[in-house]
Image (cartoon, rainbow, N blue to C red):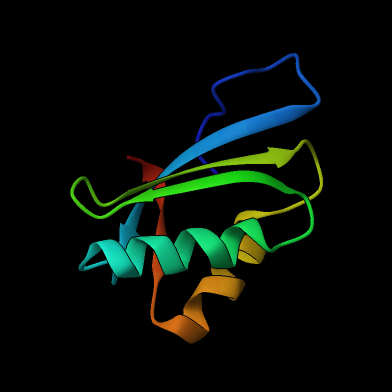
Amino acid sequence: MNTPDNDTASTVTYRFATTGISCAGCANRAGSILSGLRGVISAHVDYVTSTAEIEVVRGMLTFDDLLAVLRPAGYGLVREAA
């Protein structure tokens, strides 16, 4: 995963570049998919900037966990910082 924004909290926020997000509807759907994953506190996906900001409970989810829930819908995340 890329470097988290906050290092001392019980949650951590990651920012990723996204793939497959081509409209506001796609962004909303991807955000809803991510938000439904246990351990995700919040997820905001922006189709204009092709980024996702995901707050998770520290140590609960991996990059692969996040990617696995998005892939079936045709969306993806890029490991490098967005």
Q: Residue furthest top?
A: 8
Q: On the rendered image, what quadrant is the C terminus found in?
A: top left
Quarter residue 69 falls in: bottom right
Residue 55: image location, x then y, percent: 62, 38
Q: On the rendered image, what quadrant is the N terminus found in?
A: top right
Q: Tell me the residue at 34%/58% (across/down).
A: 18
- Left or right placement of residue 59 versus residue 23 in this view: right
Q: Tell me the residue at 57%/68% (across/down).
A: 33
Residue 35: image location, x then y, percent: 62, 56
Residue 59: image location, x then y, percent: 80, 41
Residue sitting nearer the eye, 42 or 82: 42
- Left or right placement of residue 54 versus residue 65 in this view: left
Residue 38: image location, x then y, percent: 79, 58
Image: 14 above or below 77: above
Image: 22 above or below 79: below
Q: Residue furthest bottom?
A: 72
Residue sitting nearer the eye, 64 or 26: 26
- Left or right placement of residue 51 versus residue 59 in this view: left
Quarter residue 42 falls in: top right
Residue sitting nearer the eye, 39 or 77: 39
Q: Tell me the residue at 67%/64% (across/down).
A: 65
Q: How many marks?
A: 0
